[in-house]
Image (cartoon, helix red, strand yellow):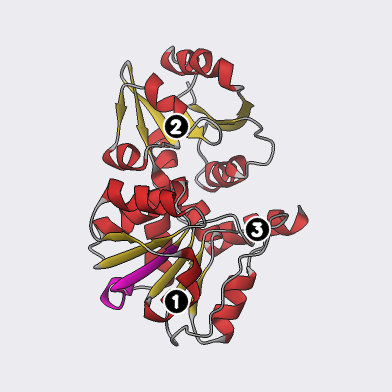
């Protein structure tokens, strides 16, 4: 029986995951399917029962289910537990396992875009303290970064994140973000600020040192104002689309038995879809 896989959320029509996985299924000539399924919060336990019953091989989870689904599975990866959210599910025998591949997706894209970045990054400035920030900080800590400064408009959330993950995280002052740009070797925007339809990210990059890596997880628009300004000032831009593509790799490998490659052709396909939206 061909593996049947899914992405669940509410709403879900915006998800580009079927386009990514569908392209890989075509590229590798694999039997199987990947579909969007709109699951309201009240219906989540029933859907997971369907997965447990063998209707699906596994799938992805997006908002608003990334936290709630953790109580319905049998085991959660270290990354999922640390972040407090998961986005990838798969069946192993009669058990359901869960992972957070946003962590590996962020790191894999950074590795691919700026090879050897760990040798030049000692201090990271992270903008935002939500779920995405938690995953990225966990990943950076796992790579041995010496100092991670988290700033957020609500300072208590930055302090909670720093206390939760511990050293080398520390909470900084959101109002000091312009100055902190100057001490960072890597700046990461984990907020939705700067995304199409959202308010702009207000930050002054005049203190940015040439060569500083600036990573924006927003991918619509493809080149955010933050990345354009960083590039203009001699920084090294890393866009958010690659993270979206790389986070899809582990799930596909588990469900279909082939580890797919993130290629320029795949990126062009998703870029065209974003520009069309």
Relative vertical location of residue 91 with respect to residue 180 in this rendering, above or below: above
Q: Crowding near pointer 1: few (<14 within 10 Å), some, many (20+)?
A: many
Estimate the spatial distance between the alpha carbons at disc 2 and disc 1, rounded to whole Å: 32 Å
Q: Crowding near pointer 3: few (<14 within 10 Å), some, many (20+)?
A: many
Identify the secondary structure beneath mark 2. loop
Snapshot quadrant of residue 37: top right
Q: Nearer the viewer, mark 2 or mark 1?
A: 1
Q: What stretch of residues is rendered in magenta?
A: 117-126
Identify the secondary structure beneath mark 1. helix
| Residue 212 spot, x, y in % from top left | 42, 80
Judged left or right of residue 62, residue 261 is: left
Residue drawn where x is 68% and y is 41% of the image:
14
Residue drawn where x is 51% and y is 59% of the image:
242
Asked if one can make out residue 228 in the rendered structure from this viewpoint, the answer is yes
Q: Which mark is residue 195?
A: 3
> Which of these two is toward me, 103 or 188?
188
Estimate the spatial distance between the alpha carbons at disc 3 and disc 1, rounded to whole Å: 20 Å
Snapshot quadrant of residue 106: bottom left
Q: Are marks 3 and 1 in contact (CB under 8 Å)?
A: no
| Residue 49 spot, x, y in % from top left | 46, 13
| Residue that carries the numbered disc 1 in the rendered image | 181
Q: Of callouts 2 and 3, which one flags the residue occurring earlier in the amino acid sequence?
A: 2
Residue 224 is covered by the magenta coloring: no
Judged left or right of residue 7, residue 171 is: left
Relative vertical location of residue 214 with respect to residue 247 in this rendering, above or below: below
Relative vertical location of residue 245 with respect to residue 72 in this rendering, above or below: below
| Residue that carries the numbered disc 2 in the rendered image | 67
């Amino acid at each position: 029986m061909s593996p049947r896989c899914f992405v669940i959320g509410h709403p879900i029509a915006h998800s580009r995951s079927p386009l990514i996985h569908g392209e890989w299924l075509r590229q590798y000539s694999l039997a199987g399917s990947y579909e969007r399924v709109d699951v309201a919060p009240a219906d989540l336990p029933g859907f997971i029962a369907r997965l447990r019953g063998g209707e699906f091989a596994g799938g992805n989870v997006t908002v608003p289910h990334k936290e709630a689904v953790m109580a319905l599975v049998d085991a959660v990866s270290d990354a999922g537990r640390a972040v407090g959210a998961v986005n990838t599910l798969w069946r192993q025998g009669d058990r359901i396992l869960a992972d957070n591949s946003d962590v590996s997706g962020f790191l894999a894209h950074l590795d691919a875009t700026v090879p050897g970045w760990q040798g030049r990054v000692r201090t990271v400035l992270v903008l935002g303290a939500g779920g995405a920030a938690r995953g990225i900080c966990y990943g950076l800590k796992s790579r041995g970064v010496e100092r991670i400064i988290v700033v957020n408009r609500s300072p208590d959330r930055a302090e909670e994140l720093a206390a939760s993950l511990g050293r080398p995280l520390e909470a900084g002052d959101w109002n000091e973000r312009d100055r902190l740009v100057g001490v960072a070797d890597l700046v990461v925007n984990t907020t939705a600020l700067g995304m199409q339809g959202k308010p702009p990210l207000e930050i002054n990059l005049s203190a940015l040192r040439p060569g500083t890596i600036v990573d924006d997880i927003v991918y619509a628009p493809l080149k955010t104002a933050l990345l354009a300004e960083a590039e203009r000032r001699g920084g090294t831009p890393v866009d958010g689309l690659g993270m979206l593509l790389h986070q899809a790799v582990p799930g596909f490998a588990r469900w279909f038995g082939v580890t797919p490659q993130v290629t320029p052709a795949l990126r062009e396909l998703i870029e065209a879809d974003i520009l069309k939206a």
